[in-house]
Amino acid sequence: MNFNEKLQNAMKMNQSLLCIGLDPDPELMREGMSVSNFNKAIIEATADLVCAYKLNLAFYEVLDKGMESLKRTINAIPKNIPIIGDGKRGDIGNTAKAYAKAMFSTLGFDATTVSPYMGFDSIEPFTEYWEKGVFILCRTSNPGAADFQGLPFILDGKQVPLFEIVALKAAQWNKKGKGHNIGLVVGATYPEELKLIRHHHPKMLLLIPGIGTHGGELASAVRNGVDNWGQGAIFTSSRQIIYASKRRDFAQAARQVALSLRDEIRHLASTREK
């Protein structure tokens, strides 16, 4: 089963477009808990509410024995739920091949995030794992994204921002591959740009961070991000869910926030104007 099939099955099974980011921060977690046990409790409380989990590698790399915690977290996630490794990798030649092997073969992620800055040869080793998902950074949710992503370029005689060229290139690269396994990362904090990308790429899978603590407005993100069938998008949230409480009920509190968010996304997707 490839990533797209696994994702569609999880979306249908859990009636969900919600992805929870498992980004452990000891200062925000319940005191005295290990990362592995904290994540395991969150997973057990929310696995029936999500279409995927996303693990940002930085939060594990910074920890003592962080990679051990990462692997234990991966093993705790049910096999029918896709896992996205958020590493934002991108390099040339054998380095890119090593990154791809690490993410997909060594760690066993179902999908990963990559940076397009160094061009197709830095992304191709990831796309060659045709059964895996590859999300290219396009219009990210951070305030500094405009420093480069919004810069104007001339394309076919028209002035367009860089992020549009990235999306166009991603669509072209998708057609080259066997698996059509490329998607885009587009932040909820830029709703008009999200709308534009969805309009130009109606069938491309979008990974949409930035809702919740990042400030993205959920209704506009869903309205502009889903495809014509109310699908085609993964909405990610981390701190809003996993740090809903620092008390003993932290896992149940996380479940309540995830349930509310899952249902709100589903309602917005089903009632939007096409």
Image (tube, rainbow, N blue to C red):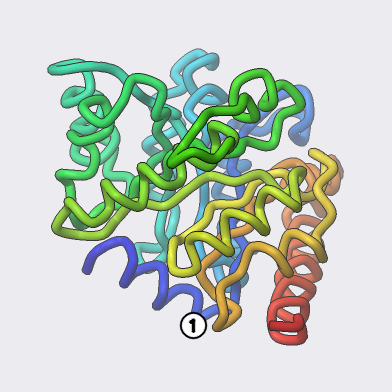
Residue 271 point in image, percent of width and height: 76, 86
Identify the image quadrant of the N terminus: bottom left
Which residue bears the numbered disc 1? 12
Closest to the observer: 137 or 87?
Answer: 137
Q: Horizontal placement of 5 versus 95: left or right?
A: right
Q: How many callouts does the rendering have? A: 1
Q: Position of residue 4 (x, y in %)?
A: 33, 66
Q: Is residue 185 above or below residue 201?
A: above
Quadrant placement of the C terminus: bottom right
Secondary structure of the residue carrying numbered label 1: helix
**Closest to the observer, 145 or 165:** 165
| Above or below 18: residue 156 | above
**Residue at the (41%, 74%) spot, across then down:** 8
The residue under label 1 is which amino acid type?
Lys
Classify 255 as above or below 56.
Answer: below
Q: Is residue 43 visible?
A: yes
Asked if one can make out residue 248 in the rendered structure from this viewpoint, the answer is no
Residue occupying image coordinates x 26% and y 59%: 180
Residue toward you, 258 or 169: 169
Q: What is the x, y in percent for residue 78? A: 41, 62
Relative to residue 49, is residue 76 drawn left or right? left
